[in-house]
């Protein structure tokens, strides 16, 4: 197992450098890409447009990043320039498992008793460092930022003999109840990134008006999670994710060896579909991949979402492709809003090679103005 872990680390590092060299080029030529809003007219959308909480400025990628595939791989490889600091807190769940919460601690703004809490759900193999930029921006606006790491993710310990699939909301509920008990006077909002959006979507739909959240943002969410989604993912991108996931399995092999075949998952699973089958289907006792995804469909309870949710998608996203975006959904529900841009890739939207993302400002602006709208309204009108 150690040899395999070392081999995957070497392959992953070489892969990172190849893709990094491809995009590490500076240029002065930029393109103004105007964001488009898709939503049903409501008092909330009027407020957001009036307060410039949505379409506040165009997306301006440099020429070298004006491609969905390059943006997508840049989203994997770029690391924040700053060395962000987090305080890690482990929360024990009922089955004696634990999840890791990483609290951002480089706040330059004095936090108040009622400062909102942003709960961030990183991408499939993301961690606190990967979302450090948005944590810093939220903190600078007077918000507490905390990153939710699913079991075993984010270099955390794994005490239980199971991981958590992206559509399983049990741990999410415990985390939000804990935050609410720790800060009973604050408003809790969520930001989901990539696969993290599936967890956030699932949670908001499953718990509806009792979610204890006031608003949410989903960046590059996938709305179609069937076999089609697995087939359309760029293979090089898929391989990169698989290497990270397999390294995580090897790191936790002692805890997982009794419930799944680690060797089969590491050596035979060369697609995310096969990985899900070898790991999560076996772990949850589900016989087929189709049954597994039906249980983890992020849109399964979308009708019950009771808070304002902003989704942000790029139309050149090679993972969450344009044809899978349910535009009619956003035209029907007044609390579901969609902003699209022609370029931006998957979970990236970078405007320079330092990894500064246009979407971060959009997300934080939206949260600020939604909370302002809620505080000025006696109740949320649909």
Image: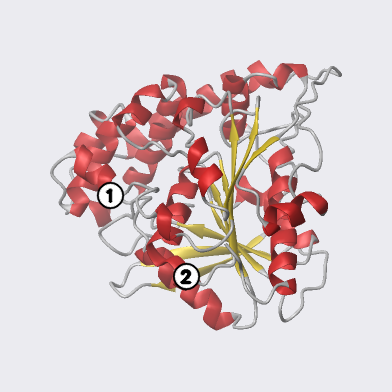
Find residue 92 and report its horizontal and vertical position in percent: 39, 73
**Residues at badges 1 and 2 in contact (C-beta under 8 Å)?**
no
**Residue located 79% across and 61% down the image:** 141
Residue that label 2 marks: 209
Residue 233 quadrant:
top left
**Residue located 18% across and 47% down the image:** 282
How would you rate the neighbour count of disc 2 (Cα within 10 Å): few for under 14, some for 14-19, many for 20 or more? some
The relative height of residue 232 versus residue 181 in the rendered view (above or below) is above
Quadrant location, the N terminus:
top left
Residue that label 1 marks: 253
Quadrant location, the C terminus:
bottom right
**Residue located 69% across and 52% down the image:** 45
Residue 265 in the figure: left or right of residue 347: left
Disc ID at residue 313: none
Residue 288 quadrant:
top left
Residue 210 in the figure: left or right of residue 307: left
**Residue located 32% across and 49% down the image:** 296
* Residue 143 visible at all: no
Residue 358 quadrant:
top right
* Residue 168 visible at all: yes
How would you rate the neighbour count of disc 1 (Cα within 10 Å): few for under 14, some for 14-19, many for 20 or more? some
SS of the residue at dot 2?
Answer: helix
Find residue 191 and report its horizontal and vertical position in percent: 58, 54
Question: Disc 1 versus disc 2: distance between alpha carbons?
Answer: 39 Å
107 vs 12, nearest the viewer: 107
The relative height of residue 134 versus residue 317 in the rendered view (above or below) is below
Find residue 128 and report its horizontal and vertical position in percent: 58, 53
Q: Nearer the viewer, mark 1 or mark 2?
A: 2
Find residue 117 and report its horizontal and vertical position in percent: 64, 68
SS of the residue at dot 1?
Answer: helix
């Amino acid at each position: 197992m150690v040899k395999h872990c070392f081999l995957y680390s070497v392959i992953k590092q070489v892969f990172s450098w190849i893709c990094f060299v491809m995009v590490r080029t500076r240029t002065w030529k930029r393109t103004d890409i105007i964001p488009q809003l898709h939503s049903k007219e409501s008092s909330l959308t009027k407020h957001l447009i009036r307060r410039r909480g949505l379409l506040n400025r165009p997306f301006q990628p440099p020429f070298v990043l004006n491609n969905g595939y390059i943006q997508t791989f840049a989203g994997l490889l770029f690391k924040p320039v700053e060395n962000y600091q987090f305080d890690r807190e482990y929360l024990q769940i009922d089955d004696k498992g634990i999840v890791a919460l990483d609290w951002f601690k480089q706040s330059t703004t004095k936090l108040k008793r009622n400062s909102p809490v942003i709960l961030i759900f990183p991408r499939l193999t993301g961690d606190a460092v990967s979302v450090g930029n948005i944590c810093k921006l939220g903190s600078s606006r007077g918000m507490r930022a905390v990153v939710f790491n699913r079991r075993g993710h984010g270099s955390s310990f794994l005490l239980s003999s199971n991981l958590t699939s992206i559509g399983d909301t049990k741990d999410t509920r415990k985390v939000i109840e804990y935050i609410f008990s720790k800060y009973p006077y604050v408003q809790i909002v969520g930001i989901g990134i990539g696969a993290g959006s599936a967890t956030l979507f699932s949670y908001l739909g499953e718990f509806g008006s009792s979610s204890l959240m006031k608003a949410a943002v989903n960046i590059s969410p996938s709305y179609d999670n069937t076999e089609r989604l697995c087939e359309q993912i760029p293979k090089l991108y898929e391989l990169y994710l698989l290497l990270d996931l397999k390294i995580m399995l090897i790191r936790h092999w002692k805890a997982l060896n009794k419930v799944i075949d680690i060797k089969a998952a590491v050596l035979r699973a060369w697609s995310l579909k096969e990985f899900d089958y070898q790991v999560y289907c076996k772990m949850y006792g589900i016989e087929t991949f189709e049954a597994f995804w039906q249980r983890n469909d992020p849109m399964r309870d979308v009708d019950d979402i009771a808070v304002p949710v902003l989704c942000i998608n790029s139309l050149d996203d090679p993972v969450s492709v344009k044809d899978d975006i349910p535009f009619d959904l956003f035209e029907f529900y007044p609390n579901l809003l969609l902003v699209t841009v022609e370029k931006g890739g998957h979970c990236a939207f970078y405007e320079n090679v330092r990894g500064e993302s246009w979407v971060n400002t959009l997300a934080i602006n939206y949260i600020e103005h939604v909370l302002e709208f809620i505080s000025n309204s006696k109740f949320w009108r649909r």
